[in-house]
Amino acid sequence: MLRVLIALVLTCLLQPAFADERAQTQQQLDATRQDIAELKKLLGKLQEEKSGVQKDLRGTETEMGKLEKQVDALQKELKKSESELQRLDGEKKKLQSARTEQQKLIAIQARAAYQNGRQEYLKLLLNQQNPEKFARTLTYYDYLSQARLEQLKSFNETLRQLANVEKEIELQQAQLLVQKSSLDTQREELEKVRKERQLALAKLNEDVKARDSKLKAREQDQAQLAKVLKTIEETLARQAREAEEARQKALIAQQEAEKKRLREAQADASDAPRKPARSSPGPLVSTGGETFGGAFASARGKLPWPVNGRLLARFGQTRGDDTRTKWDGVMISATAGSQVHAVHGGRVVFADWLRGAGLLVILDHGNGYLSLYGHNQTLLKAAGDVVKAGESISTVGNSGGQDTPALYFAIRQQGRPSDPTQWCRAQG
C-alpha cells in the first residue's frame, strides 16, 4: 500500500511539469503553424510576381524576335542594294570607257568628214559634173552626222540616268543604314531589358526556392513538434490512468485494512484497539526544486552562466534577415568542447537531437521552470538524470546547422520564454 501511495504522489507531482511542457510545445506548434501559413501566403505572392515577370519576359523576347526579323530583311535589302550599286558601277565604268573610245572615234570621223566634205563641196561646186551624185553625197553626210549626234545624245542621256540612279541608290542605302542603326539601338535596349528580366526572374526563382526550403523546414519542425506533443499527451494520459489505478488500489487496500481491523477488534474486544503503524515515506524528488538546490524562482538574478563567453545574440533580437522571428534565448560564443554547466539543480527531461537546436538538453527545475542548452557537441546526461547546480551536462559544439561553435541557452517560465540575462549574474 505504501508503494501505491508513493506512486500516486509521484504522479501528482510530475503531472504539472508534463502539463507545462505540453502547453509550451502546443504554443511552439501554434507559432510554427502560423509561420507556415505566412510563408505559404508569401510564396503565393512570389509565384504571382514570378508569373508577371515571365509574362513581361515573353513579350520582350517576342518583340525582339520581330525586330531581329526586320533587321535581317534590311540587311538583305542592303546587300541587294550594294550588289545593284556594284553592277551599276561596273556598267558605268564600261560606258565611260566606251564613251572615251567613241569620243575619239567621233573626233576622227568629224575631222575626216569635215575635211572630205569641204573638198567634195568645193569640187562639186566648181565642176558641177554630176548634180545627182552631189545630192546623194550631201544626204549621206547629213545622215551620218545625224546618227553621230543621236548616238552622242543617247550616250549622254545614259550617263545622266546612270548618275541619277547612282544618287538614288546612295540615298536608299543611307536610309537603310539609318534604319539599321535605329533597329540595332532598339535591339540593344531590348537585350538590356531582357537581361534585367532574366536577372529579376532568377532572383525570384532563388527567393521562391529559399522560401520553399524554409517552408519545408518549418513543416518538418511542425511534424517534429507534433510528435513531441503526441508523446507528452500519451505520457499524461498514461500517468492519469496509472494515478487512477493507484487510487483504486489504495482505496481497496484501505477498505481491506479496515475490515481486517474490525475483525481483529471483534475477536479480541478486551484488548485496546491498536493504531496501524504509519511509515513515513522516503525523500522524494520534488518538482518544486527543493532537492535541486532551492526554489528556482528565488534564484532570479543570481544564476551563473552555463559557459563563459561573449553574447552573439540577445533575447528578443531579430534572427537574421527574417524580421518575423526573434531570439527566444541567447547565443553564447565558446570554444568547441567547452563544458556546459547546469545553472540550477534539476532533472533532465530531454537529451537528444532536435531539428533547429541540434543536440539539446532540457532541465526541469520544478514549478514550470525549464532551462534549455542547444547546439551541443556531446551530451553528458540522459533523460531522467538528476543534476546539481554547476554539474557538467554537455559540451559546446555547432550541431543543428551552426557555422561556428556556440551555445544556445534559454529559460522557460510556464511555457513562456524569459530573458536569461534577467536570471543570470551580470558578467564582468
Image (tube, rainbow, N blue to C red):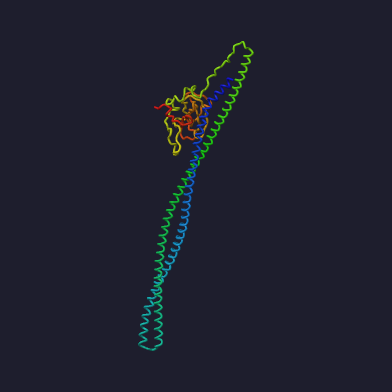
Q: Position of residue 364 (x, y in %)?
A: 50, 27
Q: Determine the residue positioned at 41% across, 87% down.
A: 132
Viewer can see residue 247 = yes
Question: Where's the N terminus, which quadrant?
Answer: top right
Q: Determine the residue positioned at 54% across, 33% down.
A: 229
Question: Where's the C terminus, which quadrant?
Answer: top left
125 up-or-down from 271: above or below: below
Q: Position of residue 198 (x, y in %)?
A: 46, 49
- Residue nearer the viewer, 21 or 174: 21
Q: Quadrant of residue 233?
A: top right
Viewer can see residue 312 = no
Outermost residue, right direction? 267
Counting every numbered tag in the picture gives 0
Q: Position of residue 277 (x, y in %)?
A: 57, 15
- Residue nearer the viewer, 405 or 252: 252
Outermost residue, top direction? 270
